[in-house]
Image: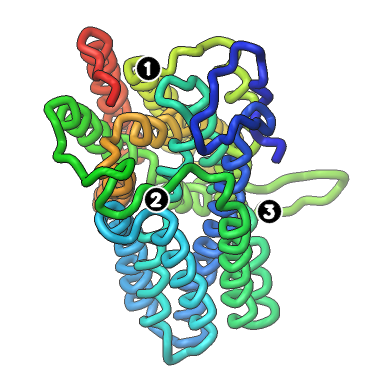
Amino acid sequence: MTVVSPLSSPDAPALSPGGAGRTLFGHPPGLTSLFLTQMWAEFSYFGLQALLVYYMTRHLHFSQGQSSLIYGLYGAAAFFSPFVGGIVADRWLGRTRSVVLGGGLMMIGHFLMAFEGLLFPALALVAVGNGLFIPPLAVQVGGLYAEDDPRRPQAFSAYYMGINLGGLLAPLVCGTLGELYGWHWGFSAAGIGMAVGLAIYLGTLRLLPPDPAAGRIGGARRTPLDAEDWRKLRLLLGIVLVIVLFRIGYEQSGNVIALWVDEQTDRHVALMGLDFEIPATWFQAVNPLLIILLTPPLIRFWRRHDRDGSPAALLRRMSLGCAIAAVAMLVMVGAAALFGATGRPVGAGWVLAYFLFLTLGELLTLPVGLSLIGLLSPVQIAAMLMGAWYIAKFLGSLLAGVMGAYWGAIPATAFFGIGAISVLAASAILLAMSRRERAHPAGRS
């Protein structure tokens, strides 16, 4: 894997037991295993998502309203289920068995999508499987490193890149197969992707950190949370709530921004004597593409310039990310003002600038937040708290949808301005939390 920068300097920290004392590009080989497992899992998940609405409207002849409702309920269940799945992994199944069971359920669900009469059971299996799969896999990323290892945030950035690499490939492969050759081919490709991810995971278990037995930690019975654990828990829940504010603005990228690109953006390009219009859907590939391109240099930058992996430093980095994302919203305020003044579609450069700032902000916010969840979560409830991280996406997406319902009812400048205010508020709160944490740092568990 070439996405993680070399960190094999003489002063690199010792690896945790999961690393087995070896490095690959300066990181434990287990990171490559988890990166590829997550990439193929996201390929399968987004492959189904890319086809779902088209499949229901074109093939099953559902109405647009009915299809959108089913799509929304499925997405909500898939984002809420990791919280429940994390509890199941912590208390009963354990991390490894939860990942394997969840991946198996998703794989079966994708294959069942090829049968028209099994639509709802198939979607249910994917949603439940996703909840069992995601939290413990992300917890295992953090388990590869000691608590004070400065490479931990970089590892989550690489892991986050794997998520987006799968999301970028899915519509290109599954979407093309489904639309051109038949829906069952697209859904089957998604199922095969999940099977590949499971095979990689099962074949590389020796590279992963030891899995505590369900209900027991380190061979002893599960101990209750102490005062310091509760302090960390309050901090983590605060972070999750702040990320909801971030996502209210961020989630418009696939909602209102898609409408803006379609209706208020000049997408005509003249090249070598040819004049053609860029498909509006192509702009949705800009974000994952930028994540893939920008993650490696960002990892190198933080490795060279900041070895402080304390919670206070990571909160400060997240605050900076939210501030940069707010600039993206302000770019769209400018684009909306120009459109209002001229009445003509604005250049595509405005949207590209929006995605550039949004992606930079995202990379400094979301993977760093994942790293904090892994760093501060009490081991007794680590998978549950990783699942709680996805509650922020669930709530943020829901509130962003409510906000998006007012698109057209209020001026576009005001609409994007509200998004900027929401993300700036998240930045300010995270900065305040950073200062408080620096003054009263959480102890190590």
Q: CA distance from mark 2 to mark 1?
A: 23 Å
- The residues bearing labels 3 and 2 have C-alpha atoms spaced at a distance of 44 Å
Q: Quadrant of residue 19?
A: top right
- Residue 136 is tagged as 2
Amino acid at dot 2: Pro
Q: Hey, which residue is sitting farthest bottom in the picture?
A: 117
In-front residue for pair 337/30: 30
Residue density around tag 1, few if under 14, some if 14–19, many if 20 or more, within 10 Å: many
Identify the mark nearer the N-term, 3 or 2: 2
Q: Residue at x 44, y 36 (%)?
A: 142
The reply, left or right, for residue 362 in relation to residue 195 is left
Q: Quadrant of the C terminus?
A: top left
> Which residue matches tag 3?
277
**Label 3 packing within 10 angstroms: few (<14), some (14-19), many (20+):** few
Q: Please report the residue visible at 54 percent of the width from the left and 52 percent of the height from the top.
A: 38
Q: Dot 2: what SS?
A: helix
Asked if the residues shown at circle 3 and circle 1 are in contact, with their CB atoms under 8 angstroms apart, the answer is no
User: Would residue 24 be found to the left or right of residue 127 on screen?
Assistant: right
Under tag 3, what secondary structure?
strand
Q: Is residue 283 visible?
A: no
Say which mark, if any, is on residue 310. 1
Question: Quadrant of residue 171 in the image?
Answer: bottom right
Q: Nearer the viewer, mark 3 or mark 2?
A: 2
Q: Could you tell which of marks 3 and 1 lies nearer the N-terminus?
A: 3
Left or right of 254? Residue 205 is right
Number of disc labels: 3
Which kind of residue does numbered mark 3 sit on?
Answer: Glu
In the rendered image, residue 74, in percent from the top left (x then y), is placed at 35, 68
Residue at x-position 25% and y-position 33%? 236
Amino acid on which the number 1 mark rests in the picture: Ser
Mark 1, secondary structure of its residue: loop
Residue 359 sits above or below residue 73 on the image: above
